[in-house]
Amino acid sequence: MLKWLDVLKFSNNGNPEPDCRVSKTDEQWKSILTPEAYRITRQKGTEKAHSSDMCTLLDPGRYACVNCETPLFDSEEKFESGTGWPSFNQPIKNNAIAYHKDKGFGMYRIETVCNTCDAHLGHVFQDGPRPSGLRYCINAAAMKKLDTNLRKVTLGGGCFWCTEAIFQQLKGVADVKSGYSGGKVMNPTYREVTSGLTGHAEAIEITYNRDEISFYDLVNIHLMTHDPTTLNKQGADKGTQYRSIIFYRNDEERDASMSAINEVQEAYDEMIVTDLQMFEAFYEAEEYHQGYFNQNPTRAYCKVVIDPKLKKFKEKYTDRLLKDN
């Protein structure tokens, strides 16, 4: 997740390299873009405020550069800012956007451009909501909405090294990130979270394809792959940061979570104490936590704790595993 200091760093010292570059002549851009899209993206124009219904469109999906179709933003990070332009909390990935200083019109701003084709998109400001505190103010004409069946779910069940390693094995799961959720402290560090004072739980954010696996199935698997009957505790890990929790994003997900808990309860002698909480923000953990088991399979914790869990999981959910597992 980018922070304001990252944005300033990239605007001063360059940007992360994109996966590829797209370059065309002005005449080529004119031939594939509408006059308005060309004016905005190639000539650094700005559309009128409230000129597009994309400002209030919050349906699931992804938004790509209208020039080169590089995915830029996910609707999960979109919010109604009231400014009259589509607003996002953060880009899909750090190298999707490039940043340049803009001192035009007597102002100092940070311009956002597509890092693949240099299309002008808009600007980024420091008045956005959590988790980043940023507001990417983007011209609607600079984007096109992509249909996608990708969704996100955030779950907590003890140490995120374990939960991440399990869900990475599933068919239909596109990505898993380790991080923190459920507390009120913005951009917490691992040390702060382990103190138990931030209110955050160690959690994972799963990006999944709903055509291949459902929210209900993910919650069901979550409840069956950790102990949801122990309050603020998983094995030797104790504290609210290790609590069992499901973060729902709407009433449908809350109801599905409750149904899954009722179904799974029969498998446990003790009462399930998994918390249900409305999702607010997910903060990615430090880089060394990401893919921890895959990066450190011989570490003692991985061999003693994660390996046995994975073995049981694979035996139980053989038909759900990716082919290479």
Image (spheres, grey):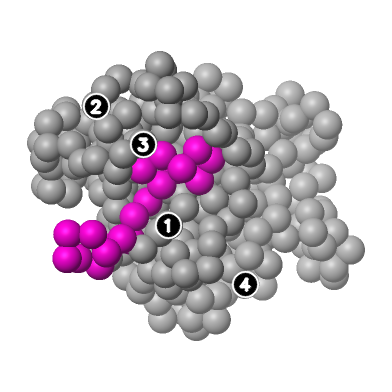
Question: Mark 2, mark 1: which one is toward the viewer?
Answer: 2
Question: Mark 2, mark 4: which one is toward the viewer?
Answer: 2
- Amino acid identity at mark 3: Arg
Residue 167 in sight: yes
Q: Work out how far the residue at label 2 is from the one at label 4, CA to CA, in angstroms.
A: 57 Å
The earlier-in-sequence mark between 2 and 3 is 2
Membership of 116 in magenta stretch: yes
Q: Work out how far the residue at label 2 is from the one at label 3, CA to CA, in angstroms.
A: 10 Å
Asked which quadrant contains residue 315, the reply is: top right
Between residue 111 and residue 289, name the one nearer to us. Answer: 111
Q: Secondary structure at mark 2?
A: helix
Residue 203 in sight: no
Q: Work out how far the residue at label 2 is from the one at label 1, CA to CA, in angstroms.
A: 22 Å
**Quadrant of the image for the C terminus?**
top right
The earlier-in-sequence mark between 2 and 1 is 2
- Amino acid identity at mark 1: Tyr
Identify the residue under disc 4. Answer: 237
Q: Residue at x 61, y 51 (%)?
A: 17
Between residue 318 and residue 294, name the one nearer to us. Answer: 294
Q: Work out how far the residue at label 1 is from the one at label 4, CA to CA, in angstroms.
A: 42 Å
Asked which quadrant contains residue 16, the reply is: bottom right
Identify the residue under disc 3. Answer: 42
Q: Which mark is residue 194?
A: none
| Label 3 packing within 10 angstroms: few (<14), some (14-19), many (20+) | many
| Residue 297 x %, y % | 85, 59
Membership of 87 in magenta stretch: no
Segment colored magenta: 102-120
Q: Residue at x 47, y 69 (%)?
A: 12
Q: Secondary structure at mark 4?
A: strand
Is 209 on the left or on the right of 106, as rendered?
right
Identify the residue under disc 2. Answer: 36
Q: Which mark is residue 99?
A: 1
